[in-house]
Image (cartoon, helix red, strand yellow):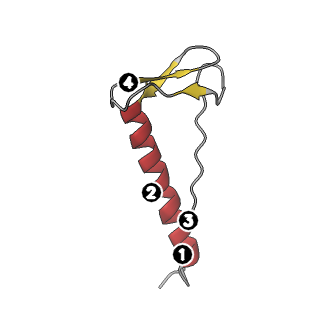
Amino acid sequence: MDVSVEIHCETCGSANFGLPDGVADAAPILCNDCGSRLGSIADLKAELLDHALARSAEALRRALPGAGEAT
């Protein structure tokens, strides 16, 4: 299953952001358009995991026969 994620700057709405060199969880992610801090690598990892789990559960509910029906 493919899961797409779009990240947008809360300040300017841009989806143009830069990831810092290295993989330190505390490293900041910055908007390339306005320079706002979007969070850290750790924040991004947590948000991506939450999003992937939610989308996976949603896809499983749709795929299971009788999902959502009262028993």
Q: In which quarter of the image is residue 24?
A: top left
When the figure is inspected, residue 1 is found, relative to residue 64, above or below; the finding is above
First in sequence, mark 2 or 1: give its number: 2
Which percent across, then down, holds residue 40? Answer: 40, 27
Which residue occupies 41% across, 41% down? 45
Nearer to us of marks 4 and 2 is 4
Task: Give the spatial CA distance, label 4 vs label 2.
Answer: 24 Å
- SS category of the residue bearing label 2: helix
Which percent across, then down, holds residue 70? Answer: 51, 81
Which labelled disc corresponds to residue 68?
A: 1
Q: Quick check: marks 4 and 2 in contact, CB under 8 Å?
A: no
Task: Give the spatial CA distance, label 3 vs label 2.
Answer: 12 Å
- SS category of the residue bearing label 4: loop
Q: Quick check: marks 3 and 2 in contact, CB under 8 Å?
A: no
For label 3, the residue is 1
First in sequence, mark 3 or 1: give its number: 3
Which residue occupies 42% across, 49% down? 49
When the figure is inspected, residue 37 is found, relative to residue 59, above or below; the finding is above
- SS category of the residue bearing label 3: loop
Task: Give the spatial CA distance, label 2 vs label 1.
Answer: 18 Å
When the figure is inspected, residue 3 is found, relative to residue 36, above or below; the finding is below
When the figure is inspected, residue 24 is found, relative to residue 47, above or below; the finding is above
- Residue type pointed to by label 4: Ala
Q: Quick check: marks 3 and 4 in contact, CB under 8 Å?
A: no
For label 4, the residue is 27
Graded by Cα atoms within 10 Å as few (under 14), some (14 to 19) or many (20 or more), the crowding at tag 4 reads: some
Which residue occupies 46% across, 45% down? 48
